[in-house]
Image (cartoon, grey):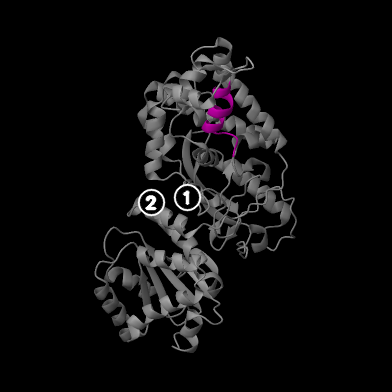
Amino acid sequence: MLQKKLPQRFSGYFKLPQHPDFDFLDIYANQDIAVFLDPYGISAMGTSWARECESQIATYFQYLIDSIQRGDKRTTKQLLNALHEVDEVGIGYSSTEPKGRGIGVVQAKQIQEAFENSEAAKSGDIKDIADCALLIPGVNRDKISDITANILKRQLVLFTQEQCKKHNIPMKKVPVEDAFDFTSFTFKSYFAELPVVNGKPKILLPISAVRRKPELSKDKYYRNFVLEFLKAEHEHAGDSLATVLKNGRVVVRIADLKAKYPIGENFLYNFSKEHPSVLAKFKSELRRTAIKQTSPVLEVKRKVLTANERITILDSIKTGNNDATNFHKISFDNLIHIFGKRLSNPSGEVKVNEGRKRIDIVFNNSDKAGFFHSLNTLHHIKCPKIIIECKNYGHEIGNPELDQMLGRLNSRRGRFGIIICRSIKDKELIIKRCKDAVHDNENYIIVLDDSDVKDLLLLKHSNEEQKIDLFFSKKLDELIL
């Protein structure tokens, strides 16, 4: 099986000399990399910038815990509701990490409830960001990555500016939204110079501070430290969990420990409160391993998801505004996967009409022999660009959505567009409306729903490239016959 070509890198976009020792993570220009920002990786840098980052993280969490202990729900809500996936850093949710979708509105509320209901937070036993990841149910390592990026946004902007000056990367003044201000203890927006890729500002991360799999993990703490401690305790006691082997050796099985001490609600907190030395040992190990990893060459390889994995992700996304971003992201990645070499230079949120409007997805038509090639040569439908809009509606799309697409199509961009939606109940009506667009102004719109996308994913999985072209040809026939 051929290795899938990796997307364009940040360094490639700005035509930097290609070498592996950038101080920053060389993110993809137009999509996310499934890695995590590790606060221990930042600490291990040992620079004055890193020490300031440590101080800011500690200050934020102290202020947060103080507000929880005071019962100040308004301040707690303000501190937690402003947290969200920092799109500018280019990490986090992508098709490579279906469960790591960043912090949306629903997740922010869940995190707020987790903090407010946590015995560890209410008691003041939360001392740092590691305690949050380990002792508060519902706050895991991908959320810690997002939280860290939010808290340190201003510091990361400074790091980005330093790297851009070092490598002569052009910057533009752009708005930086919801950055924590350590003078007012609130999230504020401001303007700063940042590199811009296809209309989107980018914030760079230190290469030494990102990990594919951060060591900061409830499972690792539970498995390698808590259970090992309990194993030694029960072996020493020789109690009912212990088994004496023929050679006289006393052993305690991990499976029996897991059954007796399941990693349930507040278990890690209660254990750590009784055995603080075990938590301290784990955090010491985090620091030690972070220092060992301060200068690796991180070559992030993009996993190609199977059709079933993509379908599972699609099915897990709920209709409505709250999950619209996730639907847009997985649709973007699915289309890149399905189209392959037919279309190139995928771009999302493309500004048009002097920035007054945005198109969800735009591809260049680079097809040499398939369906999109025949649009030009056989059907004489001008389509240098393929325009795509994504609608995560829980109801049928109608004339407003078709009119929006018609407004995107013209003689310069092209006369062909695709609308991706969740479901179509009255397919005959949709086809009739799309036919009207052909007859009225010779614009061609194909509407695909979840079932269509799933069919295309399965065809791609089976390497049925000709059937993919035939699929789109049949969709076009519905408009012109």
Q: Main secondary structure of the magenta part?
A: helix
Identify the mark at residue 98; answer none if there is no mark.
1
* Viewer-side residue, 288 vs 42: 288
Start-end of magenta stretch: 214-228
Is residue 350 rendered to the left or right of residue 427? Answer: right
Considering every residue shown, the one lying at the far front of the view is: 246
Q: Is residue 363 magenta?
A: no
- Split into 4 quadrants, where in the image is the C terminus? bottom left
Residue 23 higher or lower than 184, as above or below: below
Position of residue 321 measured from the top left corner of the image (x, y, whole percent): 34, 53
Residue at the spot of label 2: 316
Residue 202 higher or lower than 269, as above or below: below
Is residue 70 rendered to the left or right of residue 288? Answer: left
Position of residue 129 measured from the top left corner of the image (x, y, whole percent): 54, 30
Residue 316 higher or lower than 57, as above or below: below
Question: Is residue 345 visible in the rendered structure shown here?
Answer: yes
* Viewer-side residue, 56 vs 285: 285
Residue density around tag 2, few if under 14, some if 14–19, many if 20 or more, within 10 Å: some
Considering every residue shown, the one lying at the far top of the view is: 237
Position of residue 96 measured from the top left corner of the image (x, y, whole percent): 53, 52
The kind of residue tagged 2 is Ser
Position of residue 248 measured from the top left corner of the image (x, y, whole percent): 62, 14
Q: Secondary structure at mark 2?
A: helix
Residue 432 higher or lower than 125, as above or below: below
The kind of residue tagged 1 is Pro
The residue at 64%/41% (across/down) is 209
Q: Is residue 216 magenta?
A: yes
Mark 1 and mark 2 in contact? Answer it, CB < 8 Å: yes
Residue density around tag 1, few if under 14, some if 14–19, many if 20 or more, within 10 Å: some
- Split into 4 quadrants, where in the image is the N terminus? bottom right
State the separation of the CA atoms marked 1 and 2.
9 Å
